[in-house]
Amino acid sequence: MLLVWIAAGYAAEGEKLRLGEFIPANPPQPAPEVAFTDADGNPATLADFDGKPAVVNLWATWCQPCLKEMPSLDRLQARFAGRLVVAAISEDRTGGKVVVPFVAEMGLKNLKVYLDPKSAVGHAFALRGLPTSIVIDARGRVVGKVEGPAEWDSDKMVGILEPLLDKEASPLKKVAR
């Protein structure tokens, strides 16, 4: 598994990789301009989420740790529907023909699934492995990330996300992209 291999490499270099833990961005940075599609093939970008905080989860059907965290992402979206966007962006090279039936089979009803078969989003965020989740505030700024699987509906993660839910994006204060 790529993430385990990378984690061993970083441990050897002295940098501690904290799998499953929220790592804040200091200072928050504008989310990159990157394109992907929704499950129907319609174009989408991270800018589409402006105005609401978002958890952008990068995953793949072949990634076992990704599959472990998907139900918690689905529950998180159900809990904060209308206040938070939980976007599951698949990095599967085969795209929708594999991803869409896979998500249906898992019974994920609340997540909005997107496709990124060329890994443009992964490259834009210098992804080190899957799963990786990027937390973006309502103003379109990356405020942190989680590398590795997490229980997104746990008290700990909800406590990290809740302060972002009360901050509306102001068109005058939006970060230029």
Image: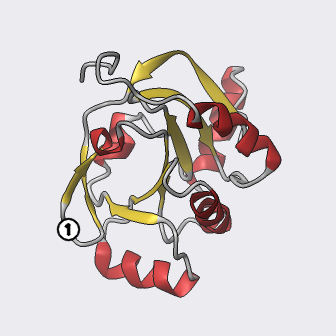
Work out whether 43 lies above or below 5: below
The quadrant of the picture occupied by the N terminus is bottom right
Residue under pointer 1: 41
Q: How far from the left and from the top, in percent, is residue 49?
A: 36, 43
Q: Is residue 39 left or right of residue 55?
A: left
Image point 51% across, 39% down: which residue? Answer: 134
Label 1 element class: loop
Q: How far from the left and from the top, in percent, is residue 65?
A: 65, 61
Q: Residues within 10 Å of mark 1 (few under 14, many from 20)?
A: few
Image point 49% across, 71% down: which residue? Answer: 61
The way the protein has been coloured in the rendering is secondary structure
Work out whether 108 lies above or below 122: below
Image point 54% across, 45% down: which residue? Answer: 133
The quadrant of the picture occupied by the C terminus is top left
Q: Is residue 18 left or right of residue 79?
A: right
Q: Is residue 3 left or right of residue 55?
A: right
Q: Nearer the viewer, residue 54 or 10?
A: 54
